[in-house]
Image (cartoon, rainbow, N blue to C red):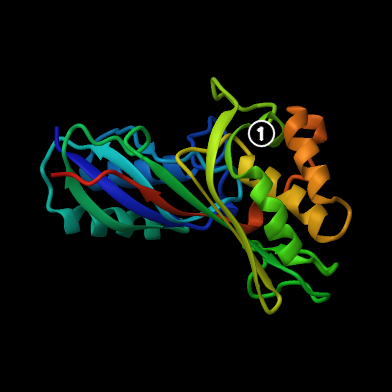
Amino acid sequence: MPRFRLDIEYDGSLYAGWQRQADQPSVQQAIEQAIEKFCGEEVSLRGAGRTDAGVHATAQVAHVDLAKAWPDDKVRDAVNAHLQAAGARIAVLKAAAVPDGFDARFSAIGRHYLYRIVNRRAPAALDKGKIWWVPKRLDAAAMHEAAKVLLGRHDFTTFRSTQCQAASPVRTLDRLDVGRSGDLIEVKASARSFLHNQVRSMVGSLKRVGEGGWTIADLKAALDARDRAACGQVAPPDGLFLVGVDYPMIG
């Protein structure tokens, strides 16, 4: 069966996350239903990252096996037509036939997330639902310095959900940068893989540093505690975006 890679963007506000749910709308289910209406096949879509309820994506990747070798553009356009007809806030940016060995989840060698904070007294209007409003002034430079504590290979038990199903809490964090431009603070995180709620947990703890509630030493102590109770506030899903997934070069 021909395998297709789909590059996808979505507004996560309407969905209970990427993964199919029994009684709530999900991004995966919406795309699977659009594919079924396009070609009459019940399919199972595998995504590179299982984003949580309310989390967005500009560059999610998934793969699906279809019975027919459709033209790439036909797959993209037909699936998008059915998504639009259903009122979904999802778009397939690109569809491409790939080798059978390609797996959107397990072939990935890097994942990149962006977290956006609007740091001003006035709430967000245009970006409401897609940014975290923090009215108290944050020291982005202090947040960036503190973030260096989390870089590298660590046991991230403190920064993962108690519902996380990963076999090990150990991950290698390759990038965690914090920068400010006017009222906008952006946190950029990169790793081969992340634990459930890891990025939001790290951002929430960095916010405590930025507002002066924690020192760098406090953040380090939280990491070393390997205890979920030591984590700061978990940032809301609104500001989180999956912005890239890396794969090895083929050929």
- Residue at the far bottom: name it: 182
Name the residue beneath numbered marker 1. Answer: 160
| Point 12% across, 40% down: residue | 68
Instruction: Note whether 4 is above or below 244 in the view shown.
Output: above
- On screen, residue 6 versus residue 186, left or right, reads left
Q: In which image quadrant can residue 104 be found?
A: top left
Residue beneath the point at 42% across and 57% down:
9
User: Residue placed at 17% from the left, 46% from the top?
Assistant: 97
Q: Residue at x 57, y 52 (%)?
A: 14
State the image coordinates of residue 248 (x, y, percent, origin top left): 27, 43
Category of crowding for the residue at label 1, using alpha-carbon neighbours closer than 10 angstroms: few (below 14), some (14–19), many (at least 20): many
For badge 1, the amino acid type reads Arg
Name the residue nearer the viewer: 101 or 211.
211
Q: Where is residue 112 shown, x and y percent of the image?
A: 48, 51
Label 1 sits on a secondary structure element that is: loop
* Quadrant that contains the C terminus: top left
Is 238 on the left-hand or right-hand side of 28?
right
Residue most toward the top?
167
**Left or right of residue 118: residue 106:** left
Position of residue 168 relative to residue 242, above or below, is: above
Residue 26: x and y, percent? 50, 42
Q: How many marks?
A: 1
Quadrant of the rendered image containing residue 168: top right
Most foreground residue, 71 or 197 = 197
Residue 94 visible (yes or no): yes
How far across and down, in percent of the image, does residue 186 sit?
Answer: 62, 64
